[in-house]
Image (cartoon, rainbow, N blue to C red):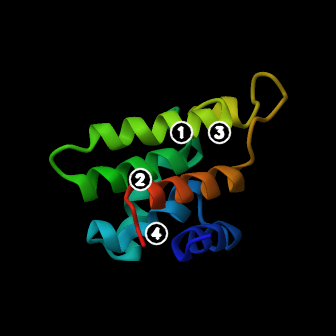
Amino acid sequence: MSERTERAINNHKNFYTCSGAVMCAFCDLAGMSEQEAGTAAMPFAGGRQGKCGAVLAAEYIINKVCGDDPEPRIKQFEDRFTGMNGSLLCSELKGRLTGKPLRSCRGCVTDAAQLLDEILDIK
């Protein structure tokens, strides 16, 4: 497990939101401070935009890092995350309608961070 993935998990353990945990672990790659990343992650928390907050944070980082052509990497990220967890949607991942969660929030943070490491090819 990478240092950034461990940082994202520890952030979540320390009461960061799912989006904040991921965003703050990768903020330096996007040229942001941790405080700026935390602020940028706020609108993504709790699935407020439908998608899982960890997914939205990862996509934000991909957009910042890949600049002119982020779409292929975002598609790769979404395809792989969905393959691992069955959905990108917070409500489905948490089982709000079915009562059967697909993945825990911590699991989504872990998966998003690991995939982000791989897709950005971070050594």
On residue 84, which mark appears? 3
Identify whether 5 is placed above or below 62. below
Q: Earlier in the sequence, mark 2 or mark 1?
A: 1
Estimate how packed mark 1 is, as few (under 14), some (14 to 19) or many (20 or more) residues with alpha carbons within 10 Å: some
Instruction: Judge from the rendering whether residue 56 lies leftward or rightward of residue 47; answer left or right.
Output: left
Q: What whole-number distance in Å separates the C-alpha atoms at marks 3 and 1?
A: 6 Å
Look at 66% across and 68% down and name the residue there.
15
Of circles 2 and 4, the one toward us is 2
Look at 61% across and 30% down and name the residue there.
87
Percent coordinates x, y for residue 114 in the rendering? 55, 58
* Disc 3 secondary structure class: helix
Q: What whole-number distance in Å separates the C-alpha atoms at marks 2 and 4?
A: 17 Å
Look at 26% across and 71% down and name the residue there.
31
* Residue lying farthest to the left in this orientation: 68
* Amino acid type, residue under disc 4 in the picture: Cys
On residue 119, which mark appears? 2
